[in-house]
Image (cartoon, rainbow, N blue to C red):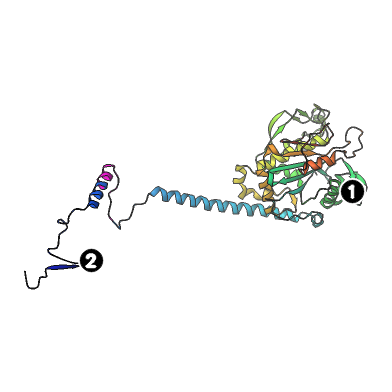
C-alpha cells in the first residue's frame, strides 16, 4: 500500500474499509430486479422508456388545444353577451323616454328580482294604422295582463275585452279602451286597476304598426289557427273600391301557419268570422294572446339570440315601457323557463253580444282568482263568458 493511500474511502453516510466497489461490481438488489422487469413490460407494450428521476414528462398536445378552444369560446360568449345587452339596452332606453312620467306614478312598486318574484305586467296594444278614419285612433286595441310565477315556472295571461263598459275615474262610464284615448297609459292603468283590483307592477305599450315590422325582423312567427276563418272586409289590400267589393275577406286555414308581420297583425285584428258567427271581440283577444305568445317564443329562439348584437335595438322599437333592460331580460327568462303546456290563458266576460250593454260578467271575480293562481282554472261556459284554460289560448 502506498504511503499516501488510505485503507478506506469516506462517504456521506460514513466510511467503510476495503476496496471501493465499482458500478459493475455493485451487488444486485431486489428493487433492481423489479425495476428492470417493469421496464421490459413497458417496452414490450410499446410504452415510453423510463428516463429516470428529473426527466420531464411529455404533454399530450390535444389537451392544450382543447383548453385553448374552450377559452376562446368563453371569451366569444362573454363578448356576445355584453354586446347583445348593450344593443338591447340602447333600444329600451328610448322606450323608457317615450313613457309618460304620470304612468309610473300609477304602478304598484315591487321589491325583489323578477327572476324569483311574481310580477304583473299590463300590455296595451295601440292601433293607429294608416287607413281611412283610423290615423288619429289612440284607443287601446288590445288589453292584456301577464303574470309570471317563477316558483312554478308558469305564465298567466288575462285578456280584457276592450268593449266592456266600466267606470273611468274622473270621467263617465264608457268602454274600457277609451281610458287610453282620454288619458294615455296613466289613466288606462288606473282604470284597469280599479276595475280588476289587481296590482299592476309594470306597463308595456305596443305599437301594432311597429310590431308588424318586429315580427318580420325576427323571421315571422308560427301560430296554430284553431278553426277556419274568413273575415269581414277590413283593411282591404286592393287599391280600388271595385276590387275590394269583390274581395271576400282575409282567409286563414285551420292548423299551424307561419305568418309574416302583416298576416299576424291581421289575424290578431279579426273580430268577425263568416265561418263562425259566434266569433266576437272576446275570441279576438284569444288570437292576440296566441300572436303574443308566438312572438315571445320566436324572440327567445337560438337564431334570434345569435343576431341580438346586431338587431337588439329593434326588439324595443315598438315598445313604450317603464321596465329597464335588465327587468325585461328577467321577465323574458321567466317566460322562457315557463312551459307552454302549463301556461294559463284567461279572459273576462260580459254582455257583448248583439244588442248587449257591455256590462261585465258576474264570473269575472272568479276568473281573476284563477289568474292569481288561487283556484283551479275553469273554462268558459259560453262564447261570451269568463274563464281560464291551460296550455292554449282561448279562441
Residue 46 among those drawn in magenta: yes
Residue 227 among those drawn in magenta: no
The front one of 280 and 312 is: 280
Element at label 2:
loop
Q: CA distance from mark 1 to mark 2?
A: 104 Å
Residue 347 at what x, y percent from top left? Answer: 80, 38
Element at label 1:
loop
Describe residue 166's horizontal placement relative to residue 306 as left or right. Answer: right
Residue 37 at what x, y percent from top left? Answer: 24, 46
Q: Residue at x 92, y 37 (%)?
A: 357
The front one of 247 and 47 is: 47
Describe residue 226's horizontal placement relative to residue 63 as left or right. Answer: right
- In the image, the segment drawn in magenta is 39-52
Identify the residue position indicated by label 2 in the image. Answer: 13
The front one of 300 and 238 is: 300
Q: Residue at x 91, y 35 (%)?
A: 356
Residue 150 at what x, y percent from top left? Answer: 69, 47
Residue 235 in view (yes/no): no
> Which mark is drawn over residue 168?
1
Residue 69 at what x, y percent from top left? Answer: 47, 49
Mark nearer the N terminus (1 vs 2) = 2
The quadrant of the picture occupied by the C terminus is top right
Question: How many numbered markers are drawn?
Answer: 2
Q: Quadrant of residue 229?
A: top right
Amino acid at each position: 500500500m502506498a504511503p499516501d493511500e488510505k485503507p478506506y474511502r469516506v462517504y456521506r453516510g460514513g466510511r467503510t474499509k476495503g476496496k471501493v466497489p465499482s458500478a459493475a461490481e455493485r451487488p444486485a438488489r431486489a428493487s433492481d430486479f423489479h425495476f428492470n422487469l417493469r421496464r421490459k413490460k413497458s417496452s414490450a407494450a410499446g410504452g415510453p422508456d423510463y428516463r429516470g428521476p428529473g426527466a420531464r414528462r411529455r404533454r399530450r398536445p390535444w389537451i392544450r388545444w382543447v383548453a385553448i378552444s374552450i377559452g376562446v369560446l368563453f371569451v366569444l360568449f362573454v363578448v356576445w353577451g355584453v354586446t347583445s345587452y348593450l344593443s338591447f339596452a340602447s333600444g329600451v332606453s328610448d322606450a323608457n323616454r317615450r313613457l309618460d312620467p304620470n304612468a309610473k306614478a300609477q304602478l304598484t312598486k315591487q321589491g325583489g328580482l323578477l327572476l324569483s318574484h311574481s310580477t304583473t305586467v299590463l300590455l296595451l296594444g295601440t292601433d293607429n294604422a294608416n287607413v281611412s278614419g283610423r290615423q288619429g285612433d289612440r284607443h287601446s286595441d288590445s288589453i292584456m295582463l301577464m303574470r309570471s310565477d317563477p316558483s312554478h315556472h308558469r305564465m298567466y295571461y288575462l285578456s280584457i275585452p276592450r268593449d266592456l263598459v266600466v267606470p273611468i275615474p274622473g270621467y263617465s262610464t264608457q268602454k274600457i279602451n277609451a281610458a287610453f284615448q282620454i288619458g294615455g297609459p296613466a289613466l288606462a292603468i288606473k282604470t284597469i286597476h280599479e276595475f280588476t283590483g289587481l296590482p299592476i307592477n309594470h306597463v308595456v305599450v305596443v305599437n301594432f304598426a311597429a310590431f308588424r315590422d318586429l315580427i318580420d325582423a325576427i323571421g315571422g312567427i308560427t301560430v296554430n289557427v284553431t278553426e277556419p276563418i274568413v273575415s269581414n272586409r277590413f283593411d282591404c289590400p286592393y287599391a280600388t273600391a271595385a276590387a275590394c267589393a269583390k274581395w271576400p275577406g282575409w282567409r286563414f286555414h285551420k292548423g299551424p301557419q307561419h305568418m309574416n308581420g302583416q298576416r299576424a297583425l291581421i289575424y290578431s285584428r279579426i273580430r268577425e268570422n263568416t265561418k263562425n258567427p259566434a266569433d266576437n271581440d272576446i275570441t279576438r283577444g284569444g288570437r292576440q294572446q296566441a300572436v303574443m305568445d308566438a312572438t315571445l317564443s320566436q324572440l327567445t329562439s337560438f337564431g334570434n339570440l345569435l343576431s341580438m348584437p346586431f338587431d337588439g335595438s329593434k326588439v324595443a322599437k315598438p315598445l313604450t315601457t317603464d321596465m329597464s333592460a335588465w327587468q325585461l331580460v328577467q321577465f323574458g327568462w321567466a317566460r322562457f323557463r315557463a312551459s307552454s303546456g302549463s301556461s294559463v290563458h284567461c279572459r273576462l266576460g260580459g254582455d257583448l253580444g248583439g244588442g248587449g250593454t257591455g256590462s261585465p260578467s258576474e264570473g269575472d271575480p272568479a276568473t281573476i282568482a284563477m289568474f292569481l293562481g288561487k283556484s283551479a282554472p275553469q273554462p268558459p261556459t259560453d262564447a261570451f263568458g269568463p274563464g281560464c284554460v291551460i296550455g292554449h289560448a282561448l279562441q
